[in-house]
Amino acid sequence: MNGTQTHEQATQDGAVPPRSPRPAHWWRRVRVVVPVVVAAVAVAATLAIRSTTGGEDRAAAAAPHADASVAGTPVTVGVDVCGEGWTGGEAGHQTFALWNNSIQGLEVYLQDTATKKVYLDVEGLGANSTRSVSADLGPGSYRFFCLPDDADPVTGVTERLTGTYDGPVTPGVVPITANDLAPALWKYVAWVRGQLPTLRRQVQAVAADVERGDRVAAEHDWLIAHRTYETLGAAYDAFGDDDAAINAVPSTTTPATKDTRLTGFHRVEALLWSGAPMTTVGRPARALVAAVGHLRDDLSTPKLQTQDIGLRAHEIVENAIQFELTGRTDAGSHTNLATIDANLTGTTRTLGFITPLLRGRDADLAETVHDLAAAQRYVRSFRHGDRWTPLADLTRTQRETLDAKLEQTVELLSEISVITDPRKSAGEDQ
C-alpha cells in the first residue's frame, strides 16, 4: 500500500518530500461524502443537492435563507441558530433549503430524538451558502444539530412529523462517537505494534542473506517481509515519514536500479531482481532494518486518530488499486498480486476491529465482508506455491475481473469510512 509519497518528490538536500496527492480513486469517497449527504446512512437515492453561494445579494441575509431559488423549506443554520424556520409537519418526503448564515463552514445533521438515528448529514456547508437536501421520514420527533468548524455545537428545537407514511423511509444510522471508536483504535494500534517485532526479524533475515551473498534466500525472505509490512495499513500517512523510508514508490523517470535516492523495500527489490552485485545490496538492506526499527520506536506514540480506523479499511484497498494493480510499485520482483493479497489481509484485520460497531449501522456489512473475501480468493488463485503470476501474464479477462472485484470492494468499504467518521457531541443526551 505504497502511495504515501514517491521518493522522486524529495528535495535535493534530502529533506522530507511533500505527500503525494490523493489517487484517482479518491473521488469515489468524495462522491459519497459530499454530493450524497446521507452517505453516513448509505442512502443516495433519496437525496438531491443543489448549492449556491448566495453572494450576489448580501441583503438576502435578512431573508429566511440566502437564495430563495433553492428548493425546500427555508431552514437557517449557523453558530447561533440551528433549524430555525422548520416547524415539523406531515411525515413523508421532506426537502430543506439549509442556509448557513454564519461566516464559517459547518456540518448539519437531522436526528430522530427518540432513536438517536441520523437521517441527513450535510458536510461542508460553506459560509452564506444554501443547499437543498431531501429525505423520506416517518412520523416522530426530529431536531437539527449544527457543528461549526470553530465553535460549539448548536442544538435545534425538537419538531414533530405526524400522520402516517407508507413509502420507503430513508434508513437512519446511530452515529459513532470518538469514545465508541477509541477501544477499536487501541486494539488496532496494539495489533500493528505486535507485528513489528516479526517484521524486524524478517528484514534482518534479508540483510543476513545479502551479507552471505545468497540471492535466492534474500529474494524469498524479501517477499515474506514485504507482505508482512503490506498488511499493516500504511496508506495515506498512517506511518508518516517512516513509510517513506520503508516503502517509498519508485520513480517514474529514473530506473530503480540507478536511483540512489530510492530507499526501503523497493530499492532492495530493484537490486536483488536485477542481478546487481550483492555487495551493492548490503547498505540498502541495512538501512531497511534501521527504518523498521525506527517505525517500532515511533509508534510508541500513536499517530492515528479515532477517525482513521474506518479510513484504513477503505484506503488500504484504494491504495492497492492505485499502486499495485497498475504495477506502479514493481521494481523487478513482479509480485504485485502478492502485495494485493497482503493488503486485503490487512483490510480484513482492520475491519474486524470495528465490525461490532458496524452491526446495525451498515446495511451492507455482510455484502462487504463477502465481497472482500471473494476478491482475496480470486487474487490467491494466481498463487502457485511460492510464486505469484506477474500482472503482465494475466489475460485481459482476468485483469478486468480483478479490477471489478477490487473496485466493488472499495466502493462498499467507502461507506464504512463515512459511517465511522466520529461525530462531535451535540447534546445527544439532552
Image (cartoon, rainbow, N blue to C red):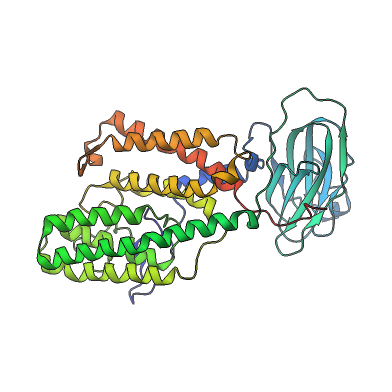
State whether residue 240 appears in this view: yes
Residue 18 occupies quadrant: bottom left
Q: Residue at x 43, y 38 (%)?
A: 372
Residue 185 occupies quadrant: bottom right
Q: Residue at x 70, y 61 (%)?
A: 149
- Near-viewer residue (137 or 61): 137
Q: Residue at x 23, y 57 (%)?
A: 222
Which residue is at the far bottom?
A: 13
- Near-viewer residue (367 or 198): 198
Residue 118 occupies quadrant: top right
Asked whether, in this view, residue 347 is left or right of residue 210, the answer is right
Question: Above or below — where is 203 with respect to 381?
Answer: below
List x then y, in percent, for residue 88.
88, 38
Question: Above or below — where is 186 with respect to 384?
Answer: below
List x then y, in percent, for residue 133.
73, 39
Which residue is at the far top?
A: 166
List x then y, in percent, for residue 278.
11, 65
Asked whether, in this view, residue 273 is left or right of residue 15, the answer is left
